[in-house]
Amino acid sequence: MLFGIRPKLLYTIGAGLLIIILIIYAMIDKYYYRNLETITIGNIHESERLINEHISFDTEKLSAITNMFITDDGFKPLFVNRDREGLYNKCLPLYTMLNQAYNITHFYFHLPDGTNFIRIHNKNLYGDHITRETFKTAVVTGKMSSGIELGKTSFAIRVVAPYYYKNKLIGYIEFGEEIDHFIDFLKRTTHEEYALIAEKDQLNKDEWLLSNKTRGIDNNWDLMPLHVWISRQDDKFIRSGCVTEKNIKHFEYGPAISPDFKDNSREMVCGGFPLYDIQKKHVGVITTLMNTSKQASILSEQKIYFITVLSVISALIFIVISLISERWIIKPIKNLASATKIFANGNLKGHRIAHESEDEFGLLTEAINDMAAQLDTFYSSTSTRTHELETLNRKLETLAITDGLTGLHNHRYFYKKIAEEIHRSNRYNHPLSLIIADIDNLKAFNDTHGHTGGDNLLKAFAETIKSTVRDTDIVARYGGDEFALLLPETDLKAAMEMAERIRSQIHVRPYFQQELPVSANISASFGVAELSLHDESLEELVKRADKALYEAKRTGRNRVVPS
């Protein structure tokens, strides 16, 4: 009978199963698009993290280059004598090497009053007054200053440091790196589209137009009233309507996606995050146009999977279909699910899915096996590369805080640690002492035995200090022939005894006997200061130790004088 109970029951079950399938389908669809925003925001946060890490790494790189340059006296006489042509000719090979090897795009010499003396990267442009915040900070603090700044034409990481010659400030050195190529780095890393956007009121229009013309970038100054593209324009961005003043305003407050951006295919999402300068002031944004088709593909696969499973459940009502389905549908699906779970847990070596058919399941099994093999190879190579990069980063970190001649910590590391130790000492009311040592008559020694002999003397003196102090003490080359010793948990009396032990070791240590002439009359003077309740800053502690050292020098050298 055409409309008997059996077909009606089958129709009812089929309709019920269809309704369930549609409900589940709708729930999956809603769940996916609700979580797509979370996934996309996470991707934008990851892009921001990558940019910040890149900026931090390159800032450290620029700082290390600047530190090495300002300690090289070979360029200073030319700057002191205002020999612009000679300075340019001597610096040009260095700038060319730094540009090619490290993407350094700016190299400046500034006079103490802020007037630019020369741009090695643009010889014919000089004489203008520098007012950037990195320069102002270096002038005010007397220390190296760094940060991102929006210049006349583009964003750049800048590092500015005071430049001394014979203990006299002769000007300031500045290295810079434009960050346009960071956009290319993001594109390569995430395989998404990005644009670097800046505020117009921070730029010089004429210079910006000239710079873009030189770089072959189209004029987009009038595309928006308040902002302008810094990176190359992308037709996909322009057509999408992602880069608008309204969206940019939305991105200025933190990583976000555009609430008004519409894409009928649901495959593109517009988002962005802000950029801040050295004053933590917003100066621009990085916008991104993300392709979400991969997530859409995953959703489609999930829908097919659940529909298939529900269809199999329906088919289980019929025993024959159940048996057939068990062998030709359920079993292959279980094999694939089990294997992909193993693969998802990272077990890619050796485990592969066995297949018995040449149908679509067989093809899918082969594809997954191939994918697992390729992922295994990729993860192995990535792990090796990650280890190499971690090793390299550790070496760079060590170089950044180490004096190349003596192997001691450098001036920068010392000032970081002394601030930490003063804070700890004040917090727990523990003693802390500082010794500043200076080799007596080093210039006369250099005149007699040459700079090689002087270097050997510095190394020998450093070895004597290292072999005498405790593991918890911090030793650094303070500058030139001066050494600084920071002694935690040590009062003035114990610090005096330590300084006296070091002083008495000179000439009897094997380092001096091996490295220096027997006839050399070597001695050193020491200034010692203990942190007191009256010390308001580390500068005061250093000043008192310096004053004690000066007194030791004044009263005959080769002695230890307390503050």
Image: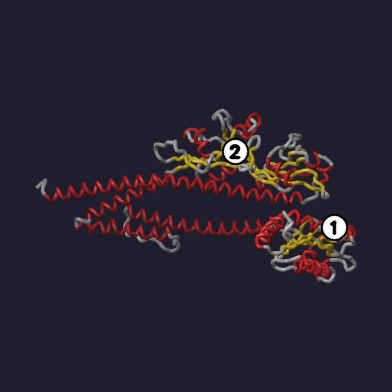
Residue at image position (23%, 59%) is: 323
Give the label, 1 or 2, closer to the camera. Answer: 1
Residue 517 falls left or right of residue 151: right
Q: How many marks?
A: 2
Residue 292 falls left or right of residue 152: left
Dot placed on the residue nearer the N-terminal end, 1 or 2: 2
Find disc 2 in the rendering and name its residue: 283
Q: Residue 218's x, y, as percent?
A: 58, 31
Residue at image position (29%, 53%) is: 309
Examine the image and state in which quarter residue 408 appears: bottom right
Q: Is residue 202 visible?
A: yes
Residue type at numbered disc 1:
Tyr
Residue 438 falls left or right of residue 337: right
What SS does tag 1 mark?
helix
Q: How far apart are labels 1 and 2 at the CA level?
A: 48 Å
Q: Is residue 28 above or below residue 470?
A: above
- Residue positioned most to the front: 533
Find disc 1 in the rendering and name its residue: 550
Q: Is residue 27 above or below residue 357?
A: above
Q: Quadrant of the C terminus?
A: bottom right
